[in-house]
Amino acid sequence: MEFDNIECVSSSDGLNEDEIHRHPNPHHGHHHQFSTSKPHSGTNNSNGVNNIVGATGITPATSVHELLECPVCTNSMYPPIHQCQNGHTLCSTCKVRVHNQCPTCRSELGDIRCLALEKVAESLELPCKYCSLGCPEIFPYYSKLKHEAICNFRPYNCPYAGSECSVVGDIPFLVTHLRDDHKVDMHTGSTFNHRYVKSNPREVENATWMLTVFHSFGQYFCLHFEAFQLGMAPVYMAFLRFMGDEAEARNYNYSLEVGANGRKLTWEGTPRSIRDSHRKVRDSHDGLIIQRNMALFFSGGDRKELKLRVTGRVWKEQQNPDASPCIQNFS
């Protein structure tokens, strides 16, 4: 859910502050899905798999790989692999889904294991399914799935927090997607200065302000600002996510500051990778958390309108930040 009437004013690295009225993003048109094709390259095998040749001339490794594809869910099958009395196979998960009836010939499945196919699978070595994205690794069949779940070359989920976006892709693809489809603010520089405005801050529900993307040190960072209930207390939270893997994210630090009237709150930490969803980061409280009463105190005036200014900076781990880690206001 996004707020209906939110003003988000941004400036970065000396840019003039322009007031931008933010409204909920309508559902944009179709998103271009990032897709990868299955690897179809043969691999060396010393266990006789190369003697299996398909009638269509498909390479042996690919032919056997297709035999190991469940006809129901199309995922690779792992033990126990089941078969009907006519030899049609399917995975154990789908055996339950089809109510013990073969989806090919409709005969009863029973509890027949296809031990021969399980043995063939043990002899296979296949490339990671993300080989087209740069992964050079080759794994035994039964180790491949575990690797692919944590492969550094696997696509990233869209980091946009305002909706459940299903688009996945590499970082350049997602940056373009965020700019063109979600219309997010894009800035260049290692410092930022944001003002968040809400006309009726007493109505705090789980909500998200517009995402902002910063390009700094040749990398991309996502600045999030959200409102939610922490127990019974309404709070606001700001945090940074790194568009890359966790190991790369540890090369950077960031600081956030909010304050007024001679008081301030500061936060310093390492940005989380977008491998972690914004909800996971938020629920772990890994960022600058501001109680609503404190946020209204910082807003000044009669405390009936939220006018919260968040400033901050990003720096590389080996660099020493300034004595005062947060930037001066660019107002």
Image: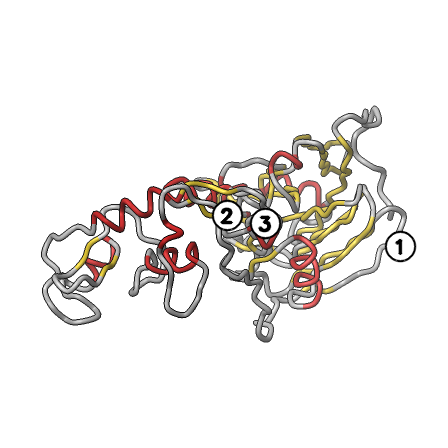
- Inter-mark Cα distance, 1 to 3: 24 Å
* Percent x, y of residue 269: 66, 31
In this rendering, the answer to whether 304 lies above or below 57 is above
- Inter-mark Cα distance, 2 to 3: 37 Å
Mark 2 surroundings: few (<14), some (14-19) or many (≥20) residues within 10 A: many
Left or right, 308 with respect to 49, comes to right
Identify the residue under disc 1: 16
Q: Nearer the viewer, mark 2 or mark 3?
A: 2
Question: Which residue occupies the foreground of this view, 311 or 114?
Answer: 114
Q: Nearer the viewer, mark 2 or mark 1?
A: 2
**Residue at 13% over, 53% down:** 112
Q: Which mark is residue 186?
A: none
Question: Which residue occupies the foreground of this view, 17 or 156?
Answer: 156
In this rendering, the answer to whether 204 lies above or below 216 is below
In this rendering, the answer to whether 291 lies above or below 318 is below
Does label 2 or label 1 sit earlier along the sequence?
1
Q: Secondary structure at mark 3?
A: strand
Amino acid beneath label 1 = Asn
Mark 3 surroundings: few (<14), some (14-19) or many (≥20) residues within 10 A: many
Does label 1 or label 3 sit earlier along the sequence?
1
* Percent x, y of residue 9: 77, 56
* Percent x, y of residue 74: 35, 62
- Assess whether mark 3 and mark 1 are in contact (beta carbons under 8 angstroms): no
Q: Is residue 214 visible?
A: yes
Amino acid beneath label 2 = Cys
Identify the residue under disc 3: 226
Question: Which residue occupies the foreground of this view, 298 or 74?
Answer: 74
Identify the residue under disc 2: 128
**Residue at 74% over, 58% down:** 185
- Residue 207, picture quadrant: bottom right
**Residue at 36% over, 42% down:** 47
Left or right, 301 with respect to 146, comes to right
